[in-house]
Image (cartoon, helix red, strand yellow):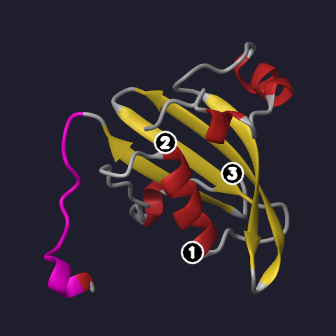
Amino acid sequence: MRNLNNIEIHQYRDRQAEYGIYGMAGDDRNGVFNVSIRSPARPVAKLAVIASSDMGWDHVSVSHKTRTPKWDEMEKIKRMFFKDDETAMQLHVPSEQHINLHPHCLHLWRPHFQEIPRPPSIMVG
């Protein structure tokens, strides 16, 4: 995950929300952000982002008040919060393990200690 104090990310930081969630200000690996993303096809999207790095995982949750984030919005968040050479994934867990605390929230994950396997590029091109 990128350093969350990086100026391109830091400008979106929400210190008040960090105190509400963490009880303290976030740091270079954990934080709360309000990100506005412009798209030619729709109005500016205001996304709530919570980023954390703990227990061997980088995790970024992305939500919108009234709808689920779109693919291009998730892609922009991935590029903003993860390094260019890092692969991040969305997980679809078995039904009995599914937890839904917000109806319009998606998550990006990256394990710290192993590479995420990927299919051959010809299969996803």
Front residue (pair 28, 50): 28
Residue type pointed to by label 2:
His
For the stretch drawn in magenta, what is the main secondary structure?
Answer: loop
Which portion, as a residue range, is magenta? Answer: 113-123
In magenta segment, residue 73: no
Residue type pointed to by label 3:
Leu
Quarter holding residue 10:
top right
Q: Is residue 67 above or below residue 28?
A: below
Residue furthest to the top: 24
The residue singled out by tag 2 in the image is 59
| Mark 3 nearby-residue class (10 Å; few <14, some 14–19, many ≥20) | few
Tell which circle, 1 or 3, labels the residue nearer the N-terminal end.
Answer: 1
Q: Position of residue 60 (x, y in %)?
A: 55, 45
Q: How far apart, in angstroms, are the residues tagged by discs 1 and 2?
A: 17 Å
Q: Position of residue 3 (x, y in %)?
A: 50, 30
Quarter holding residue 71:
bottom right
Front residue (pair 39, 53): 39
Total numbered badges shown on the rendered structure = 3
The residue singled out by tag 1 in the image is 71
* Badge 1 vs badge 3, beta-carbon distance below 8 Å: no
